[in-house]
Amino acid sequence: MDNNKKQTQAAMSDPKKTYDLIELARQCETMGRSSAVIPSSDLPVEVPPARPTSFGQKLIHALPYPIHTASMAVSTSLNVGTAVLSHLIDGPLHHNWSLSTTATMAFFKSLVNHLPPQGAHSYPIMSRNMRIEVWPSICGVKHQNVAVDVDGSPELSLRLQRALGIEHKLKHKTSDDVHTRWRTIQGEWVRHKSLGAITETEPVVFYLHGGAHHLLSPGTHRTLTAEISKHSGASVFAPDFRLAPKNPFPAAVEDVVACYVALIGAKSTLGGEALDFRGVNVTAHDPNIVPILPVSQRRVVVMGDSSGGGLAVQFLNAVKRMGLPMPAGAALLSPFLDIDLASASWHTNWNTDYLTADPFGVRWMMGMYANGLRRTHPAVSPIYGNLSGFPPILIQAGDSEVLRDDAIRFQARATQHGSQVRVELFRGMFHVFQAFLVVPNEAREAIRRICNFTKEITRPLDRNDSGFQATDPVPGEPFNSSKPPAPEASTSKAAATVVNAGLDTIYAEPLQQDASSENIESPPKKLHTYLTLVNLTKDGRVEEEIVRSRVPRLH
């Protein structure tokens, strides 16, 4: 066992090798270690936990694959049946949950609980079944596959790493082809069939899919991008960026930056001829789907869900540090902004959300994505960094999901740094509820608000090419002047009404500095922030209230 342990550590410490998640999980199960081994160095090596933490998970993951699959199906069926009976007898967990909502939540919660990231059978099951694409005809969209050809990939990678201050901190190369000059990034354009001809002033949505930085694709999110296209009147471009564990951070950020540069035609800002971005293949364009390129950055709105929301903020941070033109704004759906899982809502909302994978396994998984950086490094967990200079950001989350406090903490910190961020919490909703048909009213209202935000911040205005500044007033929802002032605008308790939002009345975490971060003034010991609570009644009415809440502390 000691020899296997030494061989595994030696393989993981070799920066020229790309380790594989499945193989590491198998080695970990073979070694049977009781805790993670973290070498005492500046660049921590993420060794997987020994095995799932609960006895039941240990048992089923020790079974052969067919038996494990069968037992998981039986257990999931029993859990769904129990949840349905509880709903019928005792009522729903939330007043706005229908019977189908309860059953769907129980189904996904059971699957997530049975598939901890470090389980021997987890990654094979997830990787095989989580790339299933939704047919364009089902969601009523016109679809066009395209490619972004990048010339000068090594130079771009080096420029990005230097801008983020991580040039000598990464443990592994992002991929074998990072040394090749030419590289192609796949992606897709989506436009709803109900929309008319493309105009030169309509918005363009730049969508980044979620999936814990390891899973899923633009095709799996096509129903969501279709709804966004339909209600915003925009074409949606979704890049198929590289994923961990084969391509850890900053591979995805590099791909997203390259696609954005191709989209807005800003290649000259990255070094002129040294980085010749040919951009999207023009010969493949369908003029009924793809707008005329390049487009102005003032028409581009970045969107992302879950880890895609976190990637969107990582992208904005890279754009700021590389001196690129900022997009008009960003809309984040249940963003995963702290990969260290430090938010208290991971525990307070554990029973009301389906995203309840083994925290030890999730931290290990995120450590692999971090690629030698600490999980609290501002480059991978933007919530710990300098959030000044960002465009207007709208964040939506459910008040019952485990990532709720990520959104609140981010808004408080960004507001303190001068950026405009609005958080909308939907009563009784769970992780990325916008994509679930079992809550059609809440999902429809959330999409409507996102699309109104998109139209407002991209409508033609007399602005310069740098986009909105942090201090600029942005017209219309959700940043109009009728909303309450920023938290630091008033120190009097009588200046704002404190409404019980059902949130924890707790304190803000201390500011954590990093060697690569800029000097930032420490926040006050207590920090309040404004939230918008959205509730849909049984008869379909939308109730909205502005509340002032203290920022959650770290768990």
Image: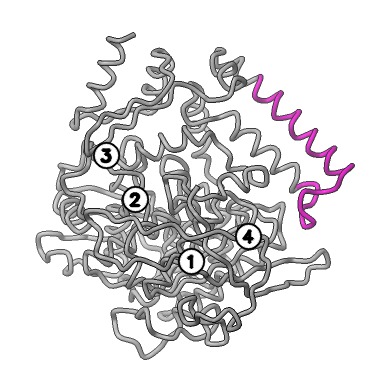
Residue 494 % position (x, y): 61, 82
Say left or right for 527 vs 493: left
CA gap between label 2 and label 1 equals 26 Å
CA gap between label 1 and label 4 equals 15 Å
CA gap between label 4 and label 2 equals 26 Å
Residue 499 % position (x, y): 67, 71
In the picture of the structure, the residue carrying the numbered disc 1 is 526
In the picture of the structure, the residue carrying the numbered disc 2 is 380
What amino acid is labelled 1 in the image? Lys
In the picture of the structure, the residue carrying the numbered disc 4 is 503
Q: Is residue 218 above or below residue 179?
A: below
Disc 4 element: loop
Residue 295 % position (x, y): 34, 73
CA gap between label 3 and label 4 equals 34 Å
In the picture of the structure, the residue carrying the numbered disc 3 is 372
For marks 2 and 1 on the same chain, the one whose residue lies earlier in the sequence: 2
For marks 3 and 4 on the same chain, the one whose residue lies earlier in the sequence: 3
For marks 4 and 2 on the same chain, the one whose residue lies earlier in the sequence: 2
**Would you identify the image quadrant in which residue 281 lies?**
bottom left
Disc 3 element: loop
Say left or right for 39 vs 109: left
Q: Nearer the viewer, mark 1 or mark 4?
A: 1
The residue shown at (45%, 50%) is: 307
